[in-house]
């Protein structure tokens, strides 16, 4: 199946068979939502009454904390129902075009990216929505990652900062490279000096001034890096990095594969509608999956040269 065939098959997906299930899940979601609103109203009333009666006492603080926990419990029930809808839809969408879907990837799938300097250091990770398979003759694996850094203040209070949210992707070139080439966002002269020591190899100077203004390249093999980063491929990378849904693109060549870290806004594969039985939800998931085709076509990874 060619990439055009896969795209056409995906966009012609008939979701009518899921309508009874989605109608049932939407009814459950609406009941859960009403329960959540009721919990918010009751807890809010109790907290307000305690505030008027006793002011900002310790009892008031306890009531606020308990109310928050109770409301979050009912809110998460709605999230569970949405995940149930995704658990039914996404495998069917992917199977329709010969791809595999796993809602919760194994923890170790991120390991290759940890040593490539294309994602920031992190203390906590959430991985989901792994899609893998082959597009024409290109094997690939994609999953969503949310990475957080944990810090504590002088009193030991814990806080988290999201340092990456987006796709981590591996495309196999079926061709081994002797070296390792890393392409990261340009951090200005001072930033590049401070972060350069963390990257394996030496900085590669390229003739494309526009590319160099947006990316920094480090490689263990200068000749190979220039062989990989042809003027045409650098132009494709620039165009791809400027797509509206991409906040930042970093990538690496290693062991016959290209690894990509694509920072983006929001979560993919969650549907574009709040109502689970809205046809727009399936359409949005189809658009999200089609982004994988965009990666392959924009970078022309199906060409024999792979570059």
Image (cartoon, grey):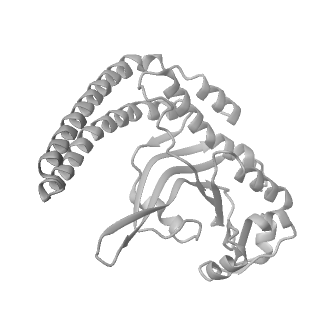
Q: Is residue 152 left or right of residue 99?
A: left
Left or right of 222, for residue 78: left
Residue most extreme to the right: 207
Q: Nearer the viewer, residue 168 or 41?
A: 41
Q: Percent from the top left, x then y, of residue 115?
A: 53, 72
Residue at horizontal 67%, vertical 46%? 295
Quadrant of res 38 = top left
Locate the N terminus by quadrant. top right
Q: Position of residue 119 (x, y in %)?
A: 55, 65
64 in relation to 32, above or below: below
The residue located at (48%, 33%) in the rendering is 271
Asked which quadrant contains residue 153, the reply is: bottom left
Task: Please report the residue visible at 23 percent of the width from the left and 30 percent of the height from the top.
Answer: 35
Front position in the image: 222 or 290? 290
| Residue 259 vertical placement versus 300 (above, below) | below
x then y, percent, for residue 19: 41, 17
């Amino acid at each position: 199946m060619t990439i055009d065939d896969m795209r056409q098959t995906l966009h012609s997906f008939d979701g009518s068979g899921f309508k009874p299930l989605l109608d049932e899940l939407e009814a459950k979601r609406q009941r859960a939502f009403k329960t959540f609103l009721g919990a918010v109203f009751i807890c809010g009333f109790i907290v307000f009454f305690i505030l008027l009666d006793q002011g900002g006492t310790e009892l008031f603080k306890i009531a606020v904390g308990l109310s928050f926990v109770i409301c979050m419990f009912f809110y998460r029930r709605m999230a569970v129902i949405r995940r149930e809808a995704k658990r039914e839809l996404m495998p069917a969408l992917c199977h329709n075009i010969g791809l595999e879907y796993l809602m919760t990837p194994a923890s170790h799938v991120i390991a290759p990216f940890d040593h490539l300097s294309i994602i920031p250091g992190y203390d906590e990770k959430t991985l989901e929505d792994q899609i893998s398979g082959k597009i024409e003759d290109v094997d690939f694996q994609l999953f969503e990652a949310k990475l957080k850094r944990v810090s504590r203040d002088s009193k030991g209070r814990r806080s988290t900062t999201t340092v990456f949210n987006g796709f981590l992707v591996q495309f196999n070139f079926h061709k081994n490279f002797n070296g390792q080439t890393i392409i990261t966002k340009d951090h200005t002269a001072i930033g590049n000096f401070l972060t350069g020591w963390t990257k394996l190899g030496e900085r590669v100077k390229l003739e494309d001034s526009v590319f160099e203004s947006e990316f920094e390249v480090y490689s263990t093999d200068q000749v190979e890096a220039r062989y990989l980063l042809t003027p045409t491929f650098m132009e494709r990378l620039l165009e791809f990095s400027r797509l509206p849904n991409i906040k930042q693109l970093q990538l690496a060549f290693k062991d016959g594969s290209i690894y990509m870290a694509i920072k983006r806004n929001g979560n993919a594969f969650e549907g574009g509608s709040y109502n689970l039985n809205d046809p727009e939800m399936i359409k949005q998931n189809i658009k999200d999956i089609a982004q994988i085709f965009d990666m392959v076509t924009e970078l022309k990874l199906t060409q024999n040269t792979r570059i």
